[in-house]
Amino acid sequence: MDTILKVKDLTKRYGTKTALDNVNFTIKRGKIYGFIGENGAGKTTTIRAITGLSEVEKGNIELFGSSTSEGIQMGRRKIGYLVESPILSMSDTAAENLRMQMLLYGHKDEAKIEKLLKRVGLGDVGKKKVKDFSLGMKQRLGIAIALINDPELLILDEPVNGLDPMGMIAVRELLKSLNEEDGITIVVSSHILAELYQLVTDYVIISHGKIIEEISKEDLDMKCSSYIIIEAEDSKKAMAVLDDNGLTDLEYDGSLIKVHDNVEQSKVARILFDARIFLTQITRYEKSLEDHYIELLGRN
Ligand code: ATP
C-alpha cells in the first residue's frame, strides 16, 4: 500500500506555547484516518501545516513521494480540505456557491456543479439559500467544494462537530462512499475517539502537540476487547489447567491471569473449580474506547 503523506517532525510555536512538538505520522492510500485529540491538541495546526495554510518552524512533509517545494505544491493540488467551517455565501444557493469557488480555480463547468451537488446528497436543494440550510447540509456543501479538484486525499477538520445524529450519519455515509467508490483517502479530525469509530480504518492520536499513538482500528479493537481476569491461590497451577483445557490466548504476569479466549466466565470458573483451584478473584474486564483513550492520555 503506498504512502501518500508523511509528516516529519512538524514543530510549531505560538509565542512560548508549543502547539506542535515533533509531530510524525504516515497516511497510506485508500484508508480513512481519524485524527483524534482533545481541544487544543494541535489538530487544526497540523492540518493547516499540511495544506499550506500556515508555516511551521521545523519539520516538513512528503506528499505523494516528494518533499521538494515544487513537489509539495503539485501534491497539494491533489488535496481537498475543509478546515473549520466552510466559507460560504449565505445569501446564495448551493450551486451559486460552488460556481464561485470553481471560478477561483479557473473552472467553469455547469455539469460538474450538478454532479458535485448530487455526489454530496444536495442534488435536490434547488433555489434554497444556504442561510436556510441545516448545519449538516452546509458541511456537505463544504465537502462538495473540497471535491472540486477531484482530490486523492481529503482532509476534514471536525466535519461532524455540532451535527445532530442524522446529520452525522449523512456525513459519515458520504465519506464512506467517497472512500469506497471513488478511492479517496480521507483524514478526519475529531476530539471524540468513539465519534469516528464507525467510519475510520485507522487512528492517529495527538495530545498536547505530540503524536501519542498510530493504530489501526483492528488493533484498537484487539486492545479494547474484553477478557477475564483471574487471581488464584495457585496461579501457576491454574495456568496449567486452563492450558490443558484448550484455552490458548492466556496472559500471565506471575500473579494475575488474563484469558483473552472467547469463552464464558462461568465455564472458566467451572474448569478451575473442578481442578480444585481456589479463586480469590474472577471478573470480566471490558475496556471501552474511552478507557483506552483516557489511559493513553494519562500515560502521556
Ligand atoms: P480544537 O479541537 O479546539 O480545534 P485543535 O486540536 O485543533 O483544537 P489547535 O487549534 O491546533 O488545536 O491548537 C493547538 C494549540 O495552539 C492550542 O493551545 C491553541 O490555543 C494554540 N493556537 C492555535 N492557533 C493559535 C494562534 N493563532 N495563536 C496562538 N495560539 C494558537
Image (cartoon, rainbow, N blue to C red):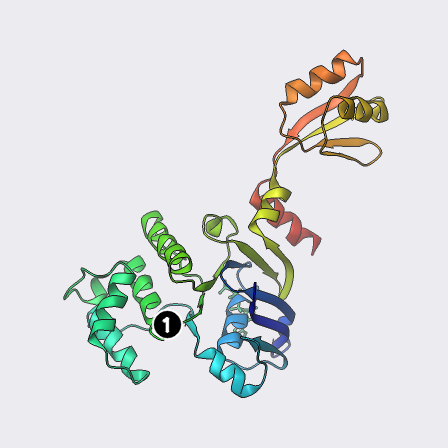
Q: Secondary structure at mark 1?
A: loop
- In front here: 286 or 276? 276
Instruction: Report the side of 255 relative to 63 (left or right).
Output: right
Disc 1 marks which amino acid? Asp
Answer whether residue 195 is visible to the viewer in this image.
yes
Residue at x 58%, y 53% (from the top left corner):
216
Q: How many marks?
A: 1
Instruction: Report the side of 40 relative to 275 (left or right).
Output: left
User: Can you say whether 52 is above or below 38 in the image?
Assistant: below
Residue at x 65%, y 18% (from the top left corner):
266
Residue 39 at x, y percent in the picture: 53, 61
Instruction: Report the side of 233 relative to 225 (left or right).
Output: right
Residue at x 80%, y 16% (from the top left corner):
277
Residue 203 at x, y percent in the picture: 56, 56
- Residue matched to label 1: 150
Quadrant that contains the C terminus: bottom right
* Residue 113, picture quadrant: bottom left
User: Can you say whether 271 is above or below 2 in the image?
Assistant: above
Q: Residues within 10 Å of mark 1 (few under 14, many from 20)?
A: some
Instruction: Report the side of 107 relative to 278 (left or right).
Output: left
Q: Residue pushed farthest bottom?
A: 70
Residue 196 at x, y percent in the picture: 47, 52
